[in-house]
Amino acid sequence: MSQRWTLLLLGLLAPSFSFASQSFENTAIVRTVELGGSLVHVTTTYAVKALEAGSSVYTIALEQQQKERTSWAEAKIKGQSNALELQDLGYDEESNTYLYDVHLPKALGTDASINLVFETVETHATYAWPPTARQEDEQKLKYNTSLFIISPYHTAVQRTKFKAPSNRVVAWSTPENLDAFTLENPVTKSGATITYGPYSNISPSANAAFIGAYQSTIGIHYFYDYPVLAISEYKRAAEISHWGANLNIEDEIHLRNAGPKLKGQFSRLAHQTQSFYQKSSPHVLSSMNLHLPAGISNAYFLDLNGNVSTSHLRSTPSVARNAKAPHYSLFEMKPRYPIMGGWNYSFTLGWDSPLADSGSWDAKAQKYVVAVPVMTLFPSTVIDNAELKIVLPEGATDVDVITPFPASVAAISNHVTYLDTTGRPTLNFYYKTLTDKHNQVVYVTYKVPFSAHLKKPLAVATAFMGLFTLALAGRRVNLSLHRKL
């Protein structure tokens, strides 16, 4: 017990500069981990009490492994939909952690309380165990994380809940030497939920002393009945055409089955038999349903061998933008062959949609506004590297962009295609580790002068006049070898 009080004193005397000016206490922390495949959703609720007046910035700490896995983070007040300002402070040497500052909507008075919800999405946090599986085997995954939820503030009580996809959990860790925090069973299981805690009276833990003395790694081993998918490369080209009143979308996708690698040889007969009895292995991808925009046409699905005729599109007509119920076209994608664990599949998916469904005219700013989706949502799939290319009409000027989240790299280039003269301005965005939370839109505003609209018909007219002139000139040229007498 004396060692614990020593660590508490160290935690209070050596706080990081970023949270030294505020004083809070965590009356309770509850972390809920939704176990999955390529994506793991983590929701942490902090019941916070201010110990001094004017406290308006709350600091959240993550350990290195958690930070490396996190591709998306958001903080809200419990029960509210608006996200709070979240500032990533990066690595803090004093606490040996990565820090986020959450700016509260208003300063709290002494003993005032608030519930903060910090939500993150972790990518590639699970792994197949065993790492190989036969064609008829089931699929089991493992997930490891830290036992304690670290925080720069004193915590009265905390617990962590792991929610598995089903009741079939193979095994879970049982932590030891927790007498200083609990006298009860340190871990319990109820159905598909495994709970660690409650653990009480935890000193400020965002410091090397606490982490070295008490922090440990816990793991969950569970069955997962769906393919574990990842997209290594994703390239989207969105071309805006005013002459055709059309928005063309084309996606180049390199899909990978990140589940257990196939052990032995693939048997087409065994696969057909499993499909007939509807007992296909969970780690085999045979088909996938994708939600595409309503009102699309001319959809195509190509792979390296050409058109994949096994796919099917159920298109719905365009709807008003303020429609309350979601409307979408259902694309039933069936690859040319089943994608086993460790296998790759590269394909191209494209379609046309009316420009009026995503574009409008801003009369006040005298500019066009077009909303371009960043990606097509692939359920429970992480996109490791993504590129979004937005091709504007030829002659577009005064281009402005509103992005839902920052890109790793952003650039502008010139794209020249058929019947173009000077080329089209092109916006290029590059992203890392996109998840379902990144399925948002980029808003592009621009102007197109009247003279720019005339470029294409003038180019066509010039081309026809040139051909006509060449034809007239060609009729007057004598190409015969001997002059007629």
Image (cartoon, rainbow, N blue to C red):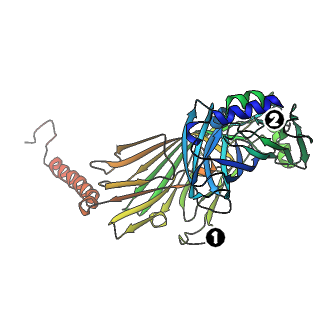
Residue placed at 78% from the left, 46% from the top?
Answer: 158
Quick one: quadrant of the N terminus?
top right
**Residue 101 rendering spot, x and y as whole percentages:** 57, 46
Q: Is residue 211 above or below residue 48?
A: above
Dividing the picture into quadrants, the one containing residue 136 is top right
**Residue 310 rendering spot, x and y as whole percentages:** 67, 50
Residue placed at 57% from the left, 54% from the top?
Answer: 54
Q: Residues within 10 Å of mark 1 (few under 14, many from 20)?
A: few
Single out the residue that lies furthest toward the left. Answer: 485
**Residue 85 rendering spot, x and y as whole percentages:** 54, 52
Name the residue carrying label 2: 219
Q: Is residue 73 left or right of residue 373?
A: right
**Residue 112 rendering spot, x and y as whole percentages:** 66, 58
Q: 384 or 186: nearer the eye?
A: 186
Q: Is residue 68 visible?
A: yes
Q: Is residue 425 left or right of residue 353?
A: left
Instruction: Give the number of the mark in front: 2 or 1.
Output: 2
Residue placed at 62% from the left, 36% from the top?
Answer: 15
Q: Amino acid at mark 2?
A: Gly
Q: Residues within 10 Å of mark 2 (few under 14, many from 20)?
A: some
How far is disc 2 from disc 1 in space, using C-alphas?
Answer: 40 Å
Quick one: quadrant of the C terminus?
top left
Name the residue carrying label 1: 325
Q: 310 or 428: nearer the eye?
A: 428
Residues marked 2 and 1 touching at CB (< 8 Å): no
Q: Is residue 305 visible?
A: no
- Lower sequence index among marks 2 and 1: 2
Callout 2: SS? strand
Q: Amino acid at mark 1?
A: Ala
